Image (cartoon, rainbow, N blue to C red):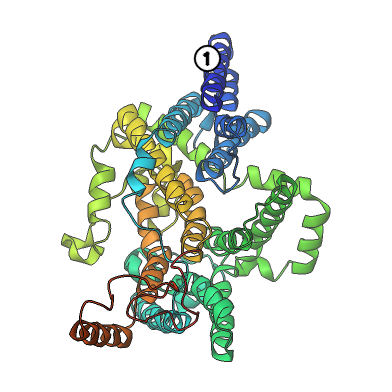
Amino acid sequence: MLRTAALALAAVAAGVGCAALAMLCLDHPRTGLLVAMCVIVPLPWAMRMVQRRWDVFEPIHLMAFAIGILFIWRPFWELHTNIQPYPGFDTRDGFNGAMMIGLVGTVFLYLGYFSKAGAAIVHRFPPLADHWDAERSVRFVRRMLVLAAFLTAMYAAQAGIHYVISTYTGRSGQATLSSQSSGYFYQGPYLTIPAAFILLIAYTRRKTTATLVLLIAVVVVAVGITVPAGDRTFMLELAMPIAAMWYLRRNRRPRVISLAVLFIVFLIFINVSLVFRSTANRAGNSLPAAVAHAFTHPQDELAKFISGADPSEFSALEVEYVGYKNHQLGFKPGGTVSSLITGWIPHEFFAGGKKPLTPLQYVTWTLFPTTQGGGSYGPSMFGSMYIDYGWFTLALFAALVGIALRSLWEYFLMAPRTSGMQLAFAASMPLAIIMLRNDVDDIVYRSVFFVVPIILCIVSCSRPSRKDRKLMARQARAAAQRGPAVSVAGPTQTGQPAGGWAPADRAPGPAHR
């Protein structure tokens, strides 16, 4: 019944959108496309409310919110204020094309998400454990920090120690040297972010002074390399999982008013950080005064945000569409797949250090050559999909991303109360928003440093240690010698594993609550 109602609602909304598009496109195509997007974007919210399955943490809701900012709020602001963010480019010429790319990408993203494919995939994988050995997880973090220190040292050796210091303490305006270093080395210091999440859970399970000191030190380093540099992407990776974990561990969800307040506070924070990340701006500005003005004039901060760099992917997509029409850009068939295959290989292994460009790099470095040092005026995930091979790859890859997001959600729902699933899911939440702003290649690369270490820690530390495995083997051999009367093949009546092993930080019990 509820499913039928949801489908009917979707059909009505689609009909309204098509009618609005037909009525307005002839005389006012920009307004018609904007109205159509306003109808399509909130469909997941309406469907889940009708189905009574609303959960603010479901990935499609986060994507719909981000799409609304990029393809509704920003285009409306462009029409209202006539902003031109890129000197030398008239973004208005690409407005209709950019809106069509966003509209098609959104529709196929939703179709992939609400198909049955995503749910069918995940049930082949076991859920992550609820409990793991806290002491071993701390040792795992120590190894992560050693690796982070090694990668940071290699990054400094290639890019220069002075550049590395200026990068993490504030942007000095010098020419960036990031492209001269491997991306593996550049990401090294940010391993402190997943390390902080693991230590936080470990400390809640095993409150020792050493764990607390290490947790504080790692958090200080993680904040120190993200906030002064004004890197909003990494600040989102640090802040969003912590907020989500607070609700997930209590089996609660934030209210809409709380989300609105958090969103405005975060916007104010990143706006202020954008000003003070440049060392040249710090001398002539007072941080307390800037913060006080931001909180007393939130409307100014909202206007600054929507007209600034963070939601400028729509404007870059307009420029991309114009560049394609003017033959400044061409399709790169297979660019997404080839970059996924070769993306993990350092560029030093390619002839002349020339690694195949991702669609995102191709677009931004062709249209904006000054960004080849490391900056990026990205045309959003949809723009990268479109430049691969037009509407075909846009629809295909958008649907595949929708299936992947649904798989993530269904996997979390397999055991939503287990701490392992909560931690891995919370860590992956900001990646969906970052993917929309960048592209698929970038998010796969980030996941290796941000989510994979957490999963590896949970899996390795939830298994019996080497000492416990040897003890279990001796007990099994002894039981076998005593005869078949003693069972060693399954859990005992108390729920303890047959070998007598249980994680060091908890009493024997069920594997999951």
Q: Position of residue 309 (x, y in %)?
A: 57, 48
**Crowd band around label 1 with a 10 angstrom C-alpha radius: few (<14), some (14–19), many (20+):** some
- Looking at the rendered structure, the kind of residue marked 1 is Cys
Q: Is 249 drawn above or below residue 299 in the view shown? A: below
Q: Is 415 drawn above or below residue 260 in the view shown? A: below
Mark 1, residue position: 18
In the image, 489 versus 137, the foreground residue is 489
Q: Is 354 drawn above or below residue 436 in the view shown? A: below
Q: Quick check: can you spot residue 326?
A: no
Q: Position of residue 454 (x, y in %)?
A: 42, 68
Q: Quadrant of residue 495?
A: bottom left
Please, which residue is most extreme toward the right here? 296
**Residue in the picture at 55% in, 78% down:** 205
Q: Position of residue 255 (x, y in %)?
A: 71, 48
**Is residue 315 shown left or right of residue 351?**
right
Considering the image in quadrants, where does the N terminus appear? top right
In the image, 157 versus 346, the foreground residue is 346
